[in-house]
Amino acid sequence: MTRPRAASERFVAQLPPKLRGRMRVVHSPLLDIRPIERKIDVSGLRGLIFTSANGVSAAAPLMRNRSLPAYCVGEATTAAAEKAGWTAQMAGETAEELIATLLHQRPGSPLLHLRGEHSRGHLAERLTQLGLTVRDQAIYRQRLLPFSKEARAVMSGHLPVIAPVFSPRTARQFADLWTGQAPLWLAAISKAAAEPLDSLDFRRLKVAKRPNSEKMRLAVKKLAKHAMRVEGVGDAD
């Protein structure tokens, strides 16, 4: 598992118990998420945009007032915003869907996109160019990490390795670091997350049908079943 530990544990816990019993879970986060202690200026704002649960977690301690509506990408981000006290709307499962929703609804603006230092898509700039004023602010850092010692040992083994990848940046780090000989089975949450993995020598790369945890769990389940049959083993890492 390449996500931060807490998110990885939640994902694994929701896999079918029978499947969990046949796999050994190796945690090797490739990103370290750290909040940036900066003041958030909400004067004049009409709403917030969250594109990840990490943004919600970083923003919550910096903002006491929860009166602004929050427009979110994905179920997990929306649930995190609601739990933190915002009135949250899931505006799509991807940034592109969120843009389409906001352009259709035309909420009051300006809006503020609270994001990580490394962000794709230039969401605020694009929405502003399309007539909806949005500014953005980085409120957390995403530091790249190496593979753990346990992960490196698994890479050099002979058992099939099933690796779910949840972001393009994590995918690039995974591709840059992978030097193993173990049979590699990959699940990517989106086409964008799959692209950096094309250079790897893998058995199969499966892209989730929708960019959410439910479809990723289904992708992992199918990969595991197929890998165990093809590789002729009873377990996978």
Image (spheres, rainbow, N blue to C red):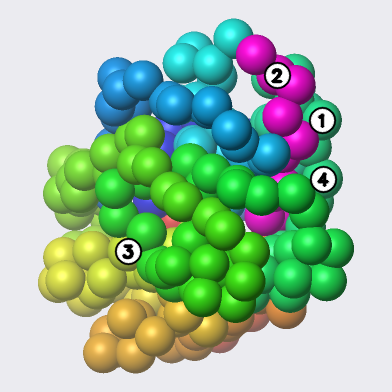
Q: Which callout, 4 or 3, points at the residue further toward the start of the chain?
A: 4
Q: Vertically, is 197 above or below 14?
A: below
Along the line of sight, which residue is nearer the eye, 23 or 146? 146
Is there a contact, CB below 8 Å, between mark 1 and mark 3? no
Task: Return the residue at label 3.
Answer: 169
Q: Which mark is residue 15?
A: none
The residue depicted at 16 percent of the width and 71 percent of the height is: 176
Secondary element under disc 2, as helix, strand or loop, is: loop
Task: Return the residue at label 2.
Answer: 66
Q: Position of residue 166 (x, y in %)?
A: 49, 60
Task: Return the residue at label 4.
Answer: 89
Q: Position of residue 19 (x, y in %)?
A: 70, 52
Task: Return the residue at label 1.
Answer: 87
Instruction: Check disc 4 and give the amino acid type.
Output: Gln
Secondary element under disc 4, as helix, strand or loop, is: strand
Quarter in which the C terminus is drawn: bottom left
Disc 3/disc 2 C-alpha distance (Å)? 31 Å
